[in-house]
Image (cartoon, helix red, strand yellow):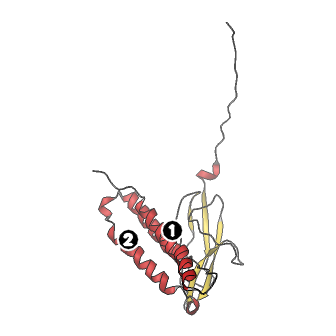
Amino acid sequence: PVNVSIQSEVKYTSNVAAASNFTVTFNSNGGSAVSPITGQAWSSFVMPIPTKSGMSFAGWYTDEGLTKLYTNPVIPAANLTLYAKWTETSTDRWAEDREKALKQLDNALERMDEGDYSNANWQRVLVEYENGKYAIAIADPQPESEDVSVINKAVQDTIYAALNTAIDRMNAIPVLVL
C-alpha cells in the first residue's frame, strides 16, 4: 500500500461590498426633486421618473455629458450619481406609441391579483411594473429610414420590446401555491 498525505490550505475571503450599503443620487437637471436611494450592493430599486414642464424624461445617465445611459435598476457596489436627460415634449415623435405601451402595461397589472402573491412577491411585481414604465419612457427607436415598415420595426424592437420584457418579468414572479 501507498500512503499519501495531502495538505491544503483554504482561504476564505468575504466580499465586504456585497454587505455594504451604497447610495444612488439623482441630479434631475432642473426637473422635479428625486430622493437618493440607499441599499445593499446588487439590490434592485425602482428607477424614478422625474417631471419637468414642457419636457419629456429621456433617461438617467452616469455622466454629466449624458452619453452613458444607465438602464440596470440595481445598486452598484459603489456610490453613484445619475443625471437626468430631457427632450422637448413636442419633439417626441414616439409619444403615442409610448402611451399605448404604458396602457398595455397598466392592463397587465390590472389582470394580476395581489391575493395570488405573498406580500414580498407582490412588491417584486410592482417593482417590475415601475421599471417597465421607465424602460418604455427611455426606449429610443432609431429607424434607418422613413419607410413605414422600417419605422414599425424600430418601434417594435424598442418600445414594445420594453413592454414585453416588463410583462414577462412581472409574470415570472412566483404566485402562492395553496
Residue 46 marker: 1
Would residue 18 be found to the left or right of residue 105 on screen? right
Estimate how packed mark 2 is, as few (under 14), some (14 to 19) or many (20 or more) residues with alpha carbons within 10 Å. Answer: some
- Give the number of the disc on residue 102: none
Q: Residue at x 65, y 66 (%)?
A: 80
Residue located beneath label 2 in the image: 108
Counting from the top left corner in percent of width and height, residue 4 is at 70, 14
Q: Residue 177 appears at what percent x and percent y?
A: 31, 51
**Residue placed most toward the observer, 138 or 76:** 138
Callout 1, which amino acid? Val
Q: Secondary structure at mark 1?
A: loop
Secondary element at tag 2: helix
Spot the residue most to the left.
178
Q: Position of residue 140 (x, y in %)?
A: 59, 79
Q: Kindly identify the residue that appears in the image at 53 percent across and 81 percent down.
A: 152
Residue 54 higher or lower than 137, as above or below: below
* Quarter assignment of residue 148: bottom right
